[in-house]
Amino acid sequence: MNKTASTPALIQLRGVSKSYASGANRFVALREVDLTVDAGECVAVVGKSGSGKTTLINLLTGIDSPSEGEIHIAGHAIERMSQAALTAWRGRNIGIVFQFFQLLPTLSVAENIMLPMDFCSTFPTAARRPRALALLDRLGIVDHADKLPADLSGGQQQRAAIARALANDPPIVVADEPTGNLDSSTSDDVMSFLASLARDGKTVLTVTHERDLSRFFTRVVTLKDGSLASDSRQPAGIAA
Amino acid sequence: MSPRWTKIRRDMANASDRLLMIVVALAVSIAAVVTMMTASAVLMREVPRNYLGTNPASAQLELDTDVSEDLLRQVRQRPGIAAAEAASAVVGRIQVSPGEWMPLRVFVVPDLAAQRINRPDADTGAWPPATGAMLIERSALPLSRTAIGDSATIQLPHAGVRSVVIAGTVHDPGVAPAWQEQTIYAYASADTLASLGETPHLDLLKIVVSEGATDVTSIERTARDLSGWLTSVGYRVHEARIPPPGKHPHQGQMNGVIQMLLAFSLLALGLGAILAATIVGGLLAQHVRQIAIMKAIGASSRQIASLYLGMVSVLGLVALAIGLPLGIVAGRGFVTVVAELLNLRIESMALPAWLFGSTVLLGLGAPLLTASIPIALAARRTVRAAMDDHGIQFQPGRGGWLTRWHLRDASLTLALRTMFRRRTRLLLTLSLLAGAGAMFITSLNLKSAWESNVTQAITDRHFDIELGVQEDAPTEQLSAMAAAVRGVIRVESWSGVAASIAKSGEMEVVQRYPDGGHGGFALRSAPPDTTLIAHHMSEGRWLKADDTDGVVINSGARGLAFRGVTLGDAITLQIDHQPVRLTVVGFMRELLTPGAVYVTPAMFGRATGQISRSNTLRIALDASGRDRADAVAHEIGQALERDHIGVKSMITEKRFAAAEGGHVYILVFALGFIAIMMAVVGLLGLASALGTGIIERTREFGVLRAIGADSAAILKSVLAEGLMIGILSVFIALVFSLLLSAQVGRVLASISSQPLNPQLTASGALAWLAIVLVGSVLVSIIPARRAARLTIRETLSHT
């Protein structure tokens, strides 16, 4: 999807910095980052460990707030939103995929996917399980719908986590090292699926430290020591 | 069921062992509260119903002559009088075994069947009894060692020793149980007394007022009006006895005790609720990442809070379902025990609706209120803060002081330091255990204090028999007769007469119940050089031979009638219708002795006219005599009878100890019951704290094992932590118990009008230490073994 002059950017970061107290010192995780992401882009955020990738994702999802700067997503200045408003907004607008899957261990795979719909009341009660099954089917694990997460492989759990991120049909999907615990073949499948989401119109931001996976993305943003080191666009995502 | 509630349901199943602790703790404490509320609800209704059911006299006027039918008719016509009857009480003795006698008090009325005031209920046997037979109070039957239909040997003031048929029993809730007062209460018609050769003087005029029956001032006014009229028509009123209107003799004590126990049981519920909050807090600590994830995918703080509050509500409801019926059963059992102690007949055990309503409110409200704090804190945490929570750890720079604590054994050092890692949880666990311990030790301290009072009272009384005679007799004669009996080594005259505070120009008014044992005080003659009592003066001095108007007031009388009086004050008593002015020279700490004010024999003689005469002797025995005190008492009684001196009472110290011991056991029993409930809650708190700590430290155990710690080292570390917490709690409990014992002691002293100074007892402290040590090991062993059995792989993969 190409940006036009009349279409405002979906995600805008202006002069965003983030620092943390560390004992008597302060640790600066992000320094004056400016970043604009348009709707439909598939962005990889890469960098070494400690470069500020996860901090950036946490700020974009409203999990953390910036020390300085502004973050606008779909016209909302999220750093000014209350925790309650942010929670409601995030549930409907951002799907998050965590590195360690973070499925709730006592719920079945299908129930895990129905949970965001339950909390946000985004679909009628009767429609939630069919939707969960449809998402699982799309990710190829519908046969495991009624199993507990512990009974699934790592790859299957990450697919379930992606399905959960899509449960409320959010326009933005954010993934933090989604392949960190997966083998290379499964990693390719997961990345490929995330790239396909962007082709379907969703905006995808993925943190990864594995540079060879950047081929799945239309844009690669590189962070170094908390600063934006490079921002390169790729025509269509080489491997997608 | 929606996924969120499915999650909570499964979380509850996974944490069932810890949640079971909440249910048990709440159920136990709810049961304790319901027990006391049941007791309160039933007794507050049944005690007045029992007492008022006898139609108690508002006042009893003692006249100088018999109350005739004609006089009764006139009295009933007087304004403010609803009912009037004649009565009398004759004091004697009853033989309960060869040579062993007990005090007997016979309530006499013209016709038992027609009696309407202070009317006992027919219980078993004949009602009304035939002339020549009498009834006894039901609680006296076993004590008198007779059966219905048996003949009992009794001794009356004028008739002497006679045989009388016990035709049946009655229930008289207006008197204390016979075993408690060590007195046999009997009921007979005037004809029966006459047939036994005793001419009863029906000189008591009992009245029930028609207005203001619950207002003592109004009753006193009516009694005074009546007294004035009686005087105007030629009668002389000696004394008006006005017991506290509508109140059972033990109503005040019972109310005080039940309120105190209810307060303790509410404290137990508070501790149970704190335990619930502690366990839920531990569970939330374990769920911190799940909560973060739920918030990240759209759950609001309110939704998260409602899930866990819902969990607590379910636990509260289950605890209510167990605790409520359990408490009702225990409460009814408690009521039955109290009914026996207060001589009550419980008509109905029905419970009012408010009891159920308030139980539900307390049972659900208390845990919800306390648990809402950790729940609110967890629900309001930001996703970031929750994701960054990695379990037990120290804030940078805040745990360094612990590193200065070293023990020889690494496992023990680890246990010691671990104990202080979750300080809030440690504080709650210690509060639970120390609270329970304080109550447990307090209950034993109080029991010990009361028993020590009984022992002290017996030690202070250097006499072995107190003998009362029907009519005063020359002191010389009485003393000589008693001293002549083998085994007697010393005899002193301690005459006594009923006394009251004088109100100028008015008749004598005493707050005495019909049983004669509750409410009054006496003026007693005391030899200044007495060796038969140890007089512990709390203020001032003991009597001197040359005292003219000096008076010493004992603790019972001070609590009853002289609270505002100080040393040197002048008091005026009404003795035999005459005002007697005395100067207070001392206050005496006299334990478990009825209210009395002591004057010299000379002063007593001036006040009563009994110069060189006596109605009471105190007799000391030698060692051989003490061994056969009942036989010596019998011999003295026989000697007096040979000289036609009627024995009114003969109380050996053994019987005194039995009477005083009986009053306190209900309180000790109830305090012990609540203390055990709290001990259960306290130990559950320890188990929960250890269990939660182990879950949080699972990874740490993995690391320990990976670097060489074996199962025994981990087991030792967890067991040592439990024991250390337990032992620390005992020290805190000891301090709390001192404060609690002093406070409860003050309440009980006020209720009983007796000084009560509970001290820390070694037996109580050691018993609690043993319970805590054994309990700590028992509650630690399961989590400790669980921790020791985990493999390294299991522990390191724990999230």
Image (tube, coloured by chain):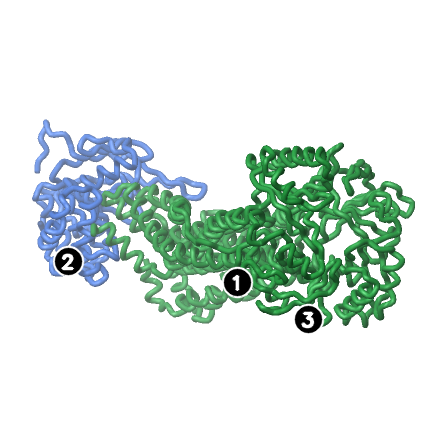
Say what amino acid the circle numbered 1 marks: Thr
Say what amino acid the circle numbered 3 marks: Ser
Distance Cα–Cα, label 2 vs label 3: 87 Å
Q: Secondary structure at mark 2?
A: loop
Residue B426 position, x and y percent, is: 49, 53
Which residue position is annotated with label 3? B97
2 and 3 marks in contact (CB < 8 Å) = no
Residue B799 position, x and y percent, is: 32, 57
Q: Which mark is residue B679?
A: none
In this view, the mark in front (2 or 3): 3
Q: Name, please, the residue furthest toward the front.
A: B70
User: What color was chain B assigned in the picture?
Assistant: green
Could you tell me which residue is drawn at 66 percent across and 53 percent down? B758
Q: Quadrant of residue B358?
A: top left
Residue A147 position, x and y percent, is: 18, 61
Q: Is residue A31 visible?
A: no
Q: Which chain is blue?
A: A
Q: Secondary structure at mark 1?
A: strand
